[in-house]
Structures are given as C-alpha cells and as structure tokens.
Image (cartoon, grey):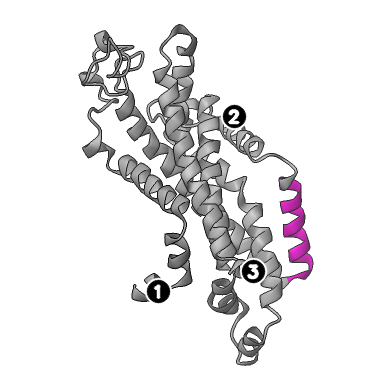
Amino acid sequence: MRAFFDSDLWWSFTRSPVTVISAVTAIVCIAGAVFAPWLAPHNPFDLASLQLLDAFKPPAWSAQGDPTYLLGTDDQGRDVLSAIMYGARVSLLVGFAAVAFSTLLGVTLGLLAGYLGGKVDALLMRIADIQLTFPGILVALLVDGIVRAALPRDVHDQIAVFVVIFAIGISNWPQFARTVRGSTLVERNKEYVQAARVIGLSPARIMVSHVLPNVMSPVLVIATLSLGFAILAEATLSFLGVGVPPTQPSLGTLIRIGNDFLFSGEWWITIFPGVALIVMVLSVNLLGDWLRDALNPKLR
C-alpha cells in the first residue's frame, strides 16, 4: 500500500483537481446506488407505501413543494431522489457487468489473435472489423431484438437484465481485442517470451502468466472509458423501451417516464434523473482520460 502512495500514479492523481473531484463524485454516485436501501428516504418500488395523492409534487424548494420529497415525486407518487438512487443501482450493475464481459471476451480473443497469428488472427480481426462498421447501440438493439423474437415475453422479462448485459458487452469487445492484439504482437517477440518457450512452457501459460500482465495497462484505460459508454447504452435501450423491465427501472427508464410529462410542467421527473446520468458518466469519463494520460510513458 505504501508503494502505491509513493508511485507516480498517485502523485499524478493528487496533482489534478479535476481528477480528484471526479473520483469523489464517482464514489458518491456508486455509494449512493449500492447503499440505496439504507440511504434512500423512501422505497419507491414498495407499492404499499405509495400514495397517488402525492403524485406530481414539485421539489421541496418550490412554493408547493413538500420537505418529505426533496426532488419531488413522479406520476405515481414515488420520491424522485429515491428512484434515482435505486435506478442508479441497475445502471451501474449493467455497466460494470457489461464491461467485465466485453473485457474478458476481448482480451481473450486479442491474446489468441496476437500470439497465434496466421489464420486465427486474420479471422478474429476480420470479425472485429465487420462489427466495428456498425454503431455499438445498433448491435445491442439487434441482439436484444433477436432474443425477444426467440423467447416468450415472460421468459424474456425474467432475464432482461442479462440480455442487456450481453447485448452491450458483445457490442464493445472489438476495442479490447484490437488493443490487446497489437500489444501482444510486440510482446511475443521479446526475450522473456522466447525464454519461456525454450524452457517448455505451454502457449496458454505463456499468454496468461507472461504476456497478459504486460498488456493490461491500455486495457484498464479502455475499460474505464467503456464504463461510461455501457451506462449510456443501457440508458438509451431503456429509454427506447427495450432495456430493463419496468419492474427494475434504471435511470434510462426514469427519464423515459418523465419525458411524457416534460411539456406539461412536471420537468423535475425527467430532468433530475438526466442530470444524475450526466454526472455519473462525466465523472467516469474524466477518470478514464486521466488514467490514459497517467499510464502513457510518453507523457511522463
């Protein structure tokens, strides 16, 4: 631990006020989502506690506001602040899981392509090139549409979160694969890899134990930046009505619900979830930008 605090990475972090603020903001967002059952003023999805008479209450600082509901209520009387905290849990869960899946798949295929070369490399990279010609959100919509057509509606609703995770993850693996493949092409010709071959280590062990640790720096940067994309992709899918089910609303679902009342004067129902989404994604992207510069040896 002391070695980390004495490292260049920590020094770079403490010398960047924007990065420190972004890190604190991201930690607050994640903590608020993870501990929502204990921190949220209300449980917005407990039907027994909802009061329709409390619907469309403006924020607490408005003339008709209620101090019980700091950011107001939606059309069903749900506390907007509590709904944001619970919705962020779903958005972050999908985001982290999708990035983990795309990282695992992309790094594995990138290692195989870079280390084995030949036909394996050509085949995997052509698949990646073809997929990169399509926008990521379009690939996610295509995957979700295929699953919806193949499964009954009630079955799809039960596994909707996993479908969204798979759809977003499968649309983002080429970035990891191409980056790892390029780094592996450089590492496989170095002396330590040749020495490992001479002593009889298997290709799988060489890739995992020797090559992989030396290509992880760019992977960490891409994963951090991809987290913001994954959260936005999930919000987009949910806003379009093809993401998580209404029983597990995310920030995208809350924005879609509030959008129906935006022009009738109840602006807080959609504005506050939108601001929460922007702050969350912006803080993660700023951390990713800092990590990219901090791990770049040319900028040291």
* Furthest-bottom residue in this view: 199
Query: Residue drawn at (62%, 78%), measured in percent from left and top?
Result: 203
Query: Residue drawn at (49%, 17%), measured in percent from left and top?
Result: 259
Judging by the rendered image, the residue that carries numbered circle 3 is 298
**On residue 6, which mark appears?**
1
Task: Please rate how many residues cluster around mark 3, counting C-alpha atoms within 10 Å: few if below 14, some from 14 to 19, many from 20.
Answer: few
Q: Amino acid at mark 1?
A: Asp
- Where does residue 5 sit, x and y in percent of width and height? 38, 70
Residue 49 as seen in the image, left or right of residue 165: left
Nearest the camera: 259 or 250? 259
Closer mark to the observer between disc 3 and disc 2: 3
The answer to if 121 sits in the magenta stretch is yes
Nearest the camera: 285 or 33? 285
Span colored in magenta: 117-131
Q: Image height check: is 111 above or below 252?
A: below
Q: Is residue 262 visible?
A: yes
